Amino acid sequence: MRRLLQPDGSLVEGGCSRLGPEQLVEALRWMLLSRLVDARATALQRQGRFGTHSPVKGQEASVVGSAMALDPAVDWIAPSYRELPALVRHGYPLERILGRSMGRSPAATRIPDGVNVLPNQVALATQLQHAVGLAWGLRLQGRPGVVMAYFGEGAASEGDSHEAMNLAGVRRAPVVFLLMNNQWAISTSREVQSAGQFFRRAEGYGFAGVQVDGNDLLAVFEAATDAVARARAGEGPTLIECVTYRLSFHNTTDNPRRYLPPGWLERAECEDPIPRLEAHLAWLGLWDQGARAALEAEVAEEVEAAVQAALAMPPSRPEDLFDQVYALPPERVRRQRQELLQHVQEP
């Protein structure tokens, strides 16, 4: 497993960072923003003001480190449902992402034109085939874009995962498969999902595979940068397995204490990627308690502004359920729409 940054923040022997000081602080900012959004969204969900939320907590280095290898102007992201900081960095406004989970109007929360992000996918692995098709299309058009497709080790058990990677290998599509192995597919442990290491599957599809410490921002960024460069040069896909830990519930409907072995979470917290990066910045002389307090205050202000902006958006209407689906809705859909509107208008 590739690692550059030790849990204590020191570099491994002979290791070096491809990220400069400003980029390291930028990465930490994205990670802290993600952690704060998780806390705020969870609190709002418990109050009945937010939909189901899947925290990024514990996986921030995998998400941010990979996203920072992309150029938002030309590259695309095909997300699952645990990549919020990558989406915001790529140009999807935070208030729109939050508004989507707060029942606001689809017109107000849609992905803006020009932002190269596909919609979140909760159905496991379905986004991978979309990603491959998009990447293949970019190649056929002679465009320089690369697609970063995110999924988890649970999604890797789906047939869609095999089909997408098989086609990507055959077509040499410029796609990077970013597999976040957080050890648990809800309550199903990694050990009962697959007998082998996930990254080794890439060889069977005819492209490169690599396993990295998913809590090591530097290692993730290095692997992702190399993979994006290969894809952009026409050398085909890469499968990156980020070995990480989910330091929270799967989503806000879940109670991990019901299935995690005793002590598992406490051991996993020792690998938390945020203290690791903070320790590295302190080692470089770029971080102290004052810097942390200032950055946390700045991020908190940004998150609160996004929450308030989302709350100010117009609410969804019942008919929004049917809009933007069919250019010419079939009769049965028109009938269902009319029945719904009559029902909600009844006293």
Image: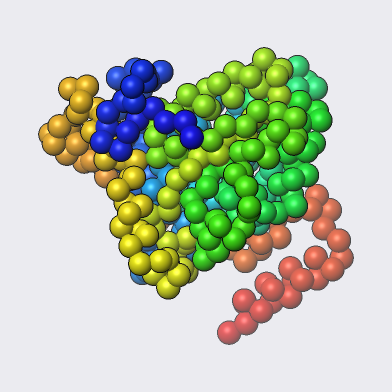
Residue lying furthest bottom? 347
Tell me: 330 left or right of 117.
Answer: right
Residue 82 in picture, x, y percent from top left: 50, 49
Residue 271 can be seen in this image: yes
Q: Is residue 17 above or below residue 57?
A: above
Asked which colour scheme the image uses, the reply is rainbow
Whether residue 300 sits left or right of residue 93 in the image: it is left
- Judge whether 216 appears above or below 185 on screen: above
Numbered-mark total: 0
Pick the quarter of the image with the C terminus: bottom right
Q: Camera-side residue: 104 or 91?
A: 91
Q: Residue at x 63, y 53 (%)?
A: 194
User: Which quarter of the figure has residue 117?
Assistant: top right
288 lies above or below 41: above
Residue 108 seen: no
The foreground one among 114 and 206 is 206
> Looking at the picture, how far across and down is residue 116, in whole percent?
60, 32
| Residue at the image position 70 percent from the left and 33 percent from the top | 203
Instruction: Determine the residue positioned at 48% across, 50% down.
Output: 182
Relative to 323, 334 lies left or right: right
Residue pictured at 50% horizontal, 40% vertical: 242
Q: Position of residue 71 (x, y in %)?
A: 54, 23
Q: Residue furthest left?
A: 290
Q: Which is more toward the observer, 251 or 346?
A: 251
- Point out residue 188 in the picture as x, y percentages from the top left corner: 55, 64
Q: Quadrant of residue 110?
A: top right
Q: Is residue 297 above or below residue 338?
A: above
